[in-house]
Image (cartoon, rainbow, N blue to C red):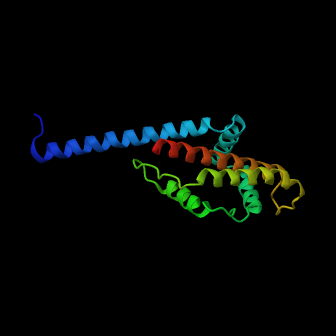
Amino acid sequence: MKPRGKLARIETLEEQAQRRLIQVEAVKVAVTERAMMGVSSEDRAALYEHLDAQEAGSAWFAEVCRASRALEGPPIGHPAGESTRAWLQALDDTPEGQDDPIPPAGAVAYLSLEAARCDTMLEYVYGVSFPDGVSLPAAQAAARWSAAWWRYEAAYARQLGEAAA
């Protein structure tokens, strides 16, 4: 027997919500895939290396995180810097099934500058003294992974901006 009345309306709303969730997640997957294709193969390799190390939760990953904190500097001064950092936080906080927020104007430029700074850091690590337990290879990985992530975020922002246009 087919539901009628309020039960039928509730089931219809649930079906619509489920279709919307599937649609939103499909868009996110497509944007992610296009963004990954928007970075170099070296950056993709660095991103996967980072994800694999993070998932393994190894001592190596902990050392790279310590190196990253040792190398971290203040955010780059850029007109879109603050709004882009807020957008990145909102992106992380977006619940499943909701559209990702649209990046602010200038986000791609800011994120690209952060990536360039990490590239410079990769050259800089040779002359730095690190805290105990942080090796040169860990510092190199931190700079390489960070640069790749910033470039990926720039590609993601570019794809979201194009999708919204």
Percent x, y of residue 130: 83, 61
Seen in the image, is 6 located left or right of residue 57?
left
Question: Residue at the spot x=69%, y=62% of the render?
Answer: 76
Seen in the image, is 28 located left or right of residue 145?
left
Q: As rendered, which of 83 and 153 lies closer to the eye?
A: 83
Seen in the image, is 86 located left or right of residue 4?
right
Q: Which residue lies furthest to the right in this view?
A: 127
Percent x, y of residue 151: 66, 46
Question: Residue at the spot x=39%, y=47% of the render?
Answer: 97
Seen in the image, is 152 located left or right of residue 63?
left
Instruction: Tell me the quarter of the picture where residue 69 sits.
Output: bottom right
Query: Which image quarter holds the N terminus?
Result: top left
Q: Is residue 42 above or below residue 64?
A: above
Question: Residue at the spot x=56%, y=36% of the render?
Answer: 34
Q: In this view, does 4 lie above or below 92?
A: above
Q: In this view, does 15 lie above or below 85?
A: above
Q: As rendered, which of 161 and 26 lies closer to the eye?
A: 161
Task: Give the total number of marks visible in the rendering.
Answer: 0
Question: Residue at the spot x=60%, y=43% of the render?
Answer: 155
Percent x, y of residue 106: 59, 54
Percent x, y of residue 8: 15, 42
